[in-house]
Amino acid sequence: MNIVLIGYRGTGKSTVGKRLAARLGRNCLSTDAEIVTRAKRTIPEIVAQEGWEYFRDLEAAVCGDLAGHDQLVIDTGGGAILRPQNVDALKKSGTLFWLTASVETITHRIGGDHQRPSLTRTKSFIEEIQDVLREREPKYQAAADHIIATDSRTIDQLVEVLLALLPPS
């Protein structure tokens, strides 16, 4: 069984995923890092040159491939849940944990991150986060087996919460 972390960027998926994988002696793979490796370009370059739909196609291929493995910790990109086939594939071989955080926490955590292009291109940084969360939260909710708020928790506390929620192996 895989452990799959979903949620908006800045909710702690990468950091928690790495620490959890180390604790369990598993590999942690990031769908975004896989996409960058396969495309040999950064995400902003992919989106600028090919568009979001092309990026989402790459993401779907990566989600399908990673779901075919076992005993991974998978850190998904924030939009992986936008395509039902990604959720279906990841759920077949894993338990999905939705990591959440407030807009304020997300803004604080990702304020200087320029590795992701704007999703709206017309709104302020905070407005974009609010709008995208409003759109995606029902999809995260529908996909999640468990929901974990990451605000005001340390990485080690989050790992302990995750470990407690894992089904017995």
Image (spheres, rainbow, N blue to C red):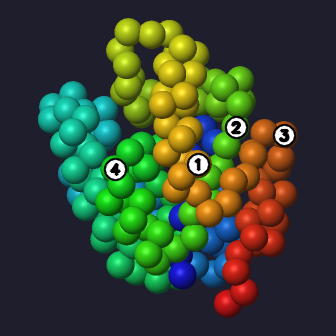
Callout 1: helix, strand or loop? helix
- Left or right: residue 166 versus residue 118 is right
What residue did someone put label 2 on? 101
The vertical placement of 47 against 21, above or below, is above
Which of the 4 image quarters holds residue 23?
A: bottom right
Mark found first going from the N terminus, 4 or 3 = 4
Answer yes or no: is residue 106 visible.
yes
Q: Which amino acid does the dot numbered 3 rest on?
A: Ser
Residue 81 is situated, as x and y percent measured from the top left of the image, at 43, 50
Q: Which amino acid does the dot numbered 2 rest on?
A: Ala
Q: Are marks 4 and 3 in contact (CB under 8 Å)?
A: no
What residue did someone put label 4 on? 83
Residue pictured at 40% horizontal, 50% vertical = 80
Q: Nearer the viewer, mark 2 or mark 1?
A: 1
Mark found first going from the N terminus, 3 or 1 = 1
Q: Which amino acid does the dot numbered 1 rest on?
A: Gln
Camera-side residue of 103 and 13: 103
Residue pictured at 22% horizontal, 50% vertical = 57
Camera-side residue of 39 and 121: 121
Q: Nearer the viewer, mark 2 or mark 4?
A: 4
Neighbourhood count class around disc 1 (C-alpha, 10 Å): few under 14, some 14–19, many 20 upward = some
Mark found first going from the N terminus, 1 or 4 = 4
Which quadrant is the C terminus positioned in? bottom right
The vertical placement of 1 against 3, above or below, is below
Q: Which amino acid does the dot numbered 4 rest on?
A: Arg
Q: Residue furthest left?
A: 50
Checking the image for residue 152, the label placed there is 3
Mark found first going from the N terminus, 2 or 4 = 4
Residue pictured at 39% horizontal, 73% vertical = 67
Mark found first going from the N terminus, 2 or 1 = 2
Q: CA distance from mark 4 to mark 3?
A: 30 Å
